Image (cartoon, grey):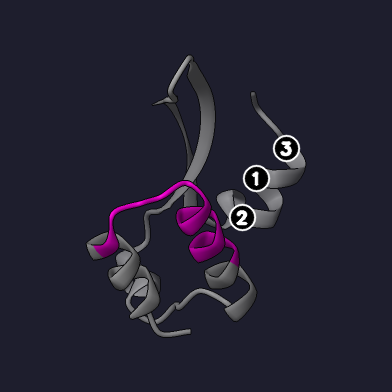
């Protein structure tokens, strides 16, 4: 679902990110989700996630039993 406040927070209007809709399959249902993807290559090479964001992503990946190889990649991302 479109959320103008979230678009502003993620930098859609600055041309940094774009909103994408996706479907995520769960055990018993499919979820309609929104994600933001960085579109500016010049900026993306310089930007790193905040410690808070990285912690949230790793915590969720652990909770949902993501593969160890993927968790390792997440943990190695610099912040």
**Hey, which residue is sitting farthest left in the picture?**
69
Query: Picture quarter containing residue 53?
Result: bottom right
**Cβ–Cβ below 8 Å for labels 1 and 2?**
yes
What kind of element bears circle 3? helix
**Hey, which residue is sitting farthest right in the picture?**
5
Image: 3 above or below 72: above
Image: 24 above or below 11: above
Q: Is residue 16 visible?
A: no
Tell me the tag on residue 64: none
What residue did someone put label 2 on? Answer: 10
Query: Which residue is rendered at x = 61% and y = 55% of the image?
Result: 10
What residue did someone put label 1 on? Answer: 7
Is 62 inside the magenta-drawn segment?
yes
Magenta span: chief secondary structure:
helix
The magenta segment is 56-68
From the image, which quarter does the N terminus lie in?
top right
What residue did someone put label 3 on? Answer: 4
């Amino acid at each position: 679902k479109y959320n103008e406040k979230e678009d502003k927070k993620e930098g859609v209007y600055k041309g940094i990110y774009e909103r994408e809709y996706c479907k995520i399959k769960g055990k018993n249902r499919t979820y309609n989700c929104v994600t933001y993807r960085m579109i500016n290559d010049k900026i993306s090479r310089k930007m790193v996630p905040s410690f808070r964001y990285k912690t949230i992503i790793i915590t969720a990946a652990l909770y949902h039993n993501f593969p160890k190889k993927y968790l390792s990649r997440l943990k190695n991302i610099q912040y």
